[in-house]
Amino acid sequence: MTYFQAIIMGLTQGITELFPISSLGHSVLLPGVLGWHNLVAAQSKPESFFLAFIVGLHVGTALGLLVYYRATWITLFRGLGRQLAGTRTNGVSSLWHLSDPDIDKNYRLLFVLAVATVPVGIAGLLFEHELRVLFAKPLAAAIFLTLNGVILLVGERLRRNGGRHVQFKSLDTMSVRGAFAIGCSQIFALFAGISRSGISMVAGLMDGLDHEESANFAFLLATPVILLAGALCAMVTALISVRFLTKWFTTKTLTPFGFYSLVAGLLCVVRFA
């Protein structure tokens, strides 16, 4: 891999990991589109330098997210500390009674984030290697990117049709079941072309969150997930991306990203078929 290739891949990772258009899909497609045959050949090998490089890029993205959400994470863990201190008088069982009105709201959010991390963590450990070898190919990634566009657009349509007169939930009241469902949705992001943040947001919208809340939950959830999976370019561009997207989703929707995924996926299907 050349320095130029590494920089381009790092910049692409930092943007596409957070924009709901699949970083893994673009990591597979971009070398093929640009004719970087050394990277294309390494993508689906059981062991390769390319996998180690992609893992490093994910760590860089996670660092960018940690920088942006540092105050939030500090607040969440302070909530954990307060809740643990409360068990000295209320008993250990109070850690599990999330419906208790006296439970610390920051501890509660940290708990549901932990629950949402479990499904994709287990699935990744069991199936990530096999799925990467089978599907980390340009044509497969193009097909899944097309499907990603369909998921985003259908999710937006269902949300519009069903949420016109709905009082949206907040992260403070998210149920464990809802968090677990969002976590399960991320399993589909193991297929190159399906966006982790995009499918998490769609699942959040279906659970009753608005765009801003579902985006924040998706980005917070991404941090521990991709830390399990060092790139300065990825870190810097991730920080820029999350600043843009948190403003974008205060008033706008997933629709542009759905159309992008649909068009880019179909063009790449034609290119690699």
Image (cartoon, rainbow, N blue to C red):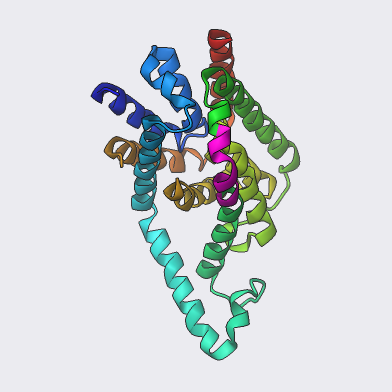
**Extreme-left residue of the structure:** 3
Please name the residue shown 56% across and 20% down the image.
142
Please name the residue shown 52% across and 88% down the image.
88
Q: Main secondary structure of the magenta part?
A: helix
Q: Please say whether residue 102 is visible from this viewpoint.
A: no
Horizontal and vertical percent position of residue 169: 64, 55
Magenta span: 121-131
| Nearer to us in this view, 9 or 2 | 2
- Quarter of the figure with residue 201: top right
**For residue 201, above or below residue 114:** above
Q: Is residue 211 left or right of 30 when viewed as pictured?
A: right
**For residue 25, above or below residue 120:** above
Q: Quadrant of the N terminus?
A: top left
Residue 46 falls within the magenta-colored stretch: no
Horizontal and vertical percent position of residue 39: 39, 21
Q: Is residue 74 left or right of 194 when viewed as pictured?
A: left
Please name the residue shown 51% across and 51% down the image.
221
Q: Is residue 164 left or right of 75 when viewed as pictured?
A: right
- Quarter of the figure with residue 90: bottom right
Q: Please say whether residue 239 is visible from this viewpoint.
A: yes
| Nearer to us in this view, 62 or 78 | 62
**For residue 167, above or below residue 131:** below
